[in-house]
Image (cartoon, grey):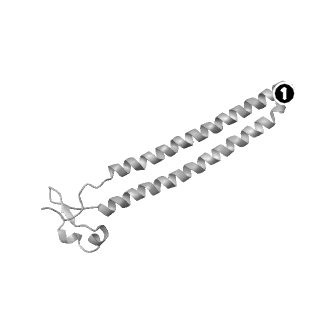
């Protein structure tokens, strides 16, 4: 398919190695530098996704907190009985606390998943060919 001469000049300057030949005769590049660049892009994408995940979790946390505080402070609208108002306020605070804990727990689990995915992709994108001169 390709001649070795087809991969001279800018390709060798970019990847820093010579092409190798597979068993069926097509030329492939030793992507020592390209593999590292690909892994870097995996981690850059994961960092961007983690930032978006942080913003989503932060917004959800703020929304649940605001709704919970509003329900707890306005529990006297539901009934005029003092003990029931205290009980409803306590229940609203409990639900708010559990909801906020759930948001933080799901956020941490999401960050762990976001960190695992590029780790696996980096592991699968390891070099397939050794850098250096081809042996044919």
The quarter in which the C terminus is drawn is: bottom left
Q: From this viewpoint, which residue is outermost toward the bottom?
A: 9
Residue 69 position within the rendered picture, expressed as x and y whole percent measured from the top left:
75, 39
What residue appears at the point 32 percent right and 63 percent down from the top-left corner? 33
Residue 126 position within the rendered picture, expressed as x and y whole percent measured from the top left:
31, 53
The quarter in which the N terminus is drawn is: bottom left
- Say if 40 sits above or below 106 in the image: below
Q: Nearer the viewer, residue 76 or 130?
A: 130
What residue appears at the point 29 percent right and 61 percent down from the top-left corner? 32
- Say if 12 sits above or below 22 in the image: below
Lateral position of residue 89 relative to residue 35, left or right: right
Number of residue marks: 1
Residue 83 position within the rendered picture, expressed as x and y whole percent measured from the top left:
83, 25
Q: From this viewpoint, which residue is outermost toward the left?
A: 136
Q: Secondary structure at mark 1?
A: loop
Identify residue for label 1: 79
Residue 76 position within the rendered picture, expressed as x and y whole percent measured from the top left:
84, 32
In which quarter of the view is residue 63 placed?
top right
What residue appears at the point 59 percent right and 48 percent down from the top-left corner? 56
What residue appears at the point 60 percent right and 51 percent down from the top-left corner? 55
Crowding at mark 1 (Cα within 10 Å: few <14, some 14-19, many 20+):
few
């Amino acid at each position: 398919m390709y001649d070795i001469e087809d991969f001279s000049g800018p390709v060798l300057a970019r990847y820093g190695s010579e092409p190798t030949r597979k068993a069926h005769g097509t030329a492939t590049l030793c992507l020592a530098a390209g593999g590292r660049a690909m892994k870097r892009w995996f981690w850059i994408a994961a960092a961007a996704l983690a930032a978006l995940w942080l913003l989503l979790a932060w917004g959800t946390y703020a929304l649940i907190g605001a709704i919970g505080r509003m329900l707890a402070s306005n529990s006297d609208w539901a009934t005029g009985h003092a003990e029931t108002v205290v009980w409803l306020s306590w229940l609203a605070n409990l639900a708010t606390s559990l909801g906020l804990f759930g948001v933080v727990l799901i956020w941490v689990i999401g960050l762990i998943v976001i960190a695992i995915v590029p780790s696996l992709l980096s592991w699968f994108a390891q070099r397939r060919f050794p850098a250096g001169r081809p042996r044919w």
